[in-house]
Amino acid sequence: MKPLKIFKGSELYSQLLDSFTINEKINVDLLKSNRISKTIFLDLAKMKHADWRMKVKFNRHRRHTISEFFQDIIVFYLNACLPDNFEIELEKKINKTQPDIAIKKNGKYIFIIEVKTTIGYERPDKNSSDPYKNFRNRVRDLANNFKVPKENIIYIFEDHGNAGKEFSEKFWDRKNHKPKLPPTDFPFSIIKPLFNEDDPYYWKHEKSFNRQINYIPYDEETIFRLAESNIVTKFEDIINQILNSENNLKL
């Protein structure tokens, strides 16, 4: 008895996961542009648009979370950009700390990245004398356990708007629709939101449009063009920070 061949998703899912294998490196000259950032924006927007279509067609009232895939997309582009003597480990645990991404160079940990879609359990406690104590302790523990300087630990956020208005205003000038200068106060100084509004579901539509039962098609050219004005932190700058991170290591 042969299996039914009516659901193609398992094969496509297999192809999706296989697509995270790096087959070619990105030319380092692209680090001088924002083309990589725009491409990541395009990747995320296309995936979220597909989720929107499924919501409508499949009568699904709650959309999927993309957080795990966001982390893997970041790692994919890190692998594609960093030289071969860099090695990336995901979910590596040392003692009680288990960061999303730990980066080695020549076998030694040099950089740590936490990847977030929201601020989560590290949301500030406004009633505390140190509202960001959890954040501060987390960075301290990561630095101690992985033997990397605190300057080499950053948080990559997908979108500045997922953590509340106060957080968002640290990074984005809503009135003029452009990023602000990077904040210098902790913990915002180590947080790198990549984008503004990378989800087509939340883009502005006509007031009469019901996104619960309809979706708007967007082509790649349109999304790629929109990416230009919705980059908050250039991914290329993060790559350069990693490449230069050895300057913070103790000799």
Image (cartoon, helix red, strand yellow):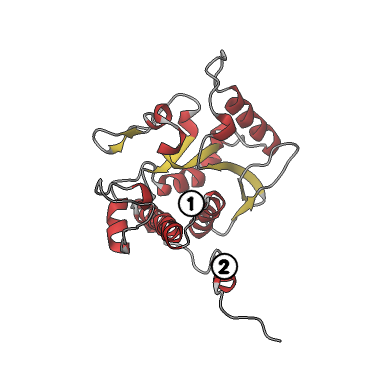
- Return the residue at label 1: 61
Q: What amino acid type is highlighted by mark number 2?
A: Tyr
Q: Quadrant of residue 114?
A: top right
Nearest the eye: 184 or 223: 223
Q: Helix, strand or loop at disc 1? A: loop
In the rendered structure, the answer to whether residue 109 lies left or right of residue 199 reads: right
The disc, 1 or 2, on the residue closer to the chain's N-terminal end is 2
Can you give x and y, in whole percent of width and height, for residue 175 in the image? Answer: 25, 33
Q: Nearer the viewer, residue 243 or 216?
A: 216
Q: Nearer the viewer, residue 251 or 200?
A: 200
Where's the C terminus, which quadrant?
top right
Say left or right for 210 vs 22. Answer: left
Circle 2 residue: 13
User: Where is residue 243 shown, x and y percent of the image?
Assistant: 50, 47
Residue 204 position in % (x across, y down): 28, 46
- Residue at image position (50%, 27%) is 187
With respect to residue 230, does 5 lie above or below?
below
